[in-house]
Image (spheres, helix red, strand yellow):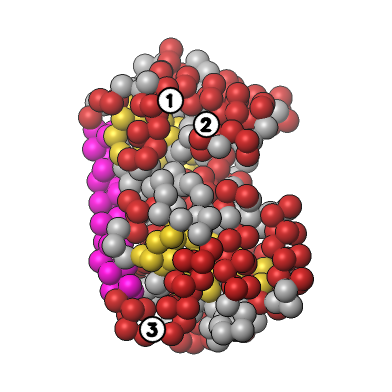
Amino acid sequence: MNIGYDGKRAFQNKTGLGNYSRSLLTILNRYFSQHQYLLFAPKQTHLFDIHHLTNIRTILPDNLWFRKLPALWRRMGMVKQISQARLDIYHGLSNELPSGIKKLKIQTVVTIHDLIFERFPQTYHLDERYTHRWKIKRACKIADAVIAISEQTKNDLIEYYGVPTQKITVCYQSCNPIFEQSITATEKTAVKKKYNLPDRYFLFVSSIAPRKNLIAICKAMISLKDDIHIPLVVIGDGKNEKEEAKRLMKENGMAQQLILLNALAAAKADSFTNATDFPAIYQQATALVYPSIFEGFGLPILEAMWSGLPVICSNTSSMPEVAGDAALYFSPNDTATLAQHLRLIASDDQLVQTLKDKGLEQAKQFSTETYANHIMQVYKSLL
């Protein structure tokens, strides 16, 4: 098969949709190397190194006009090049399909990640909500198959947009295979020195936005400041929420307990932007803390479980689907329970080992091979 993809996110997004795209293409190339994978992208960057992936190639805008107007090219201009590529299937990886693709004689698939803008409209601008709603409703209508990344997202598509149940397949994603590898002591030491990591630390991995709820961790840590002195290492960036977290920790004499890796000079290196150093950071942490209010999936939870890392996470949306019985749960606004969990992880070695063991077993349900097979089954069902 010749299978095409919207490649913008793979080359331009460092987190979220970018990670989804990079992981999926890498995994499909590994398990189904007999097929050809074409990434239609406005530009190609070092964020996704495809040189060693022999069956993946990039198709860029074919004229100066569309190179100067990449959004227009993605919306409609690339359909001509999709047609010329003689694809069997085109897969929109990030909630949308280009205009005009329905006229082509190819099958289409779209992945829908979440409808958070419908559940929490106050966290989005009016124009953002309208754009997301229009793209997703249209994509689900014209696509031959819809992939939801969790049962939560499937249920939301049915509830909010009336997408037929039989059109939706839940394909739980896997994560970058690098998280399945044990990092050597030498590599860990090098990464620890590179980012000046403390001996023990809790880990938060996410963009820093209100829905991601970093403030809840800060409040829980402040309540424990006389008992536990384990800092929080943050991989991710943001604006207002980040500044609020810094202010809150500083006011309580805990400024040094909040370590923002994205602010370090080392974060400018390729090994940080493409996540090469992340497994070593995960595998040296005390626990992942993931207090998000709502998720379509919750990829850092899976990355943590593969890394042999205990997980503390919210009990909402898709997160129990991912973590199963391998996490300590709390309501996103219940900082007292979160504080209790932090205390337990810091002091109960037996519990930590139990969570690690359960996490590794749970992670196997989201193996790269299982993920690749589920995606390929969707493709084959259309041909």
Quote the CA–CA distance across marks 1 and 2: 8 Å
Q: Assign the magenta stretch its main secondary structure.
A: helix
Q: Is residue 291 left or right of residue 234?
A: left
Mark 1 residue crowding within 10 angstroms, few (<14) / some (14–19) / many (20+): few
Residue occupying image coordinates x 58% and y 55%: 213
Nearest the eye: 160 or 221: 221
Mark 2, residue position: 118
**Residue at far top of view:** 103
Q: Is residue 167 magenta?
A: no
Work out which quarter of the rendered image holds the C terminus and state it. top left
**Earlier along the polypeptide chain: callout 1 or callout 3?**
1
Q: Which residue is mark 1?
A: 160
Amino acid at circle 2: Glu
Residue stretch rendered in magenta on the structure: 355-380
Q: CA distance from mark 1 to mark 3?
A: 43 Å
- Residue 323 is situated, as x and y percent measured from the top left of the image, at 34, 59
Q: What secondary structure is marked by label 2?
A: helix
| Residues marked 1 and 2 touching at CB (< 8 Å) | yes
Query: Residue at point 60% right, 24% down?
Result: 130
Residue in view at x 46 percent, y 38 percent: 114
Closest to the camera, between mark 3 and mark 2, is 3
> Is residue 110 placed above or below 312 in the rendered structure?
above
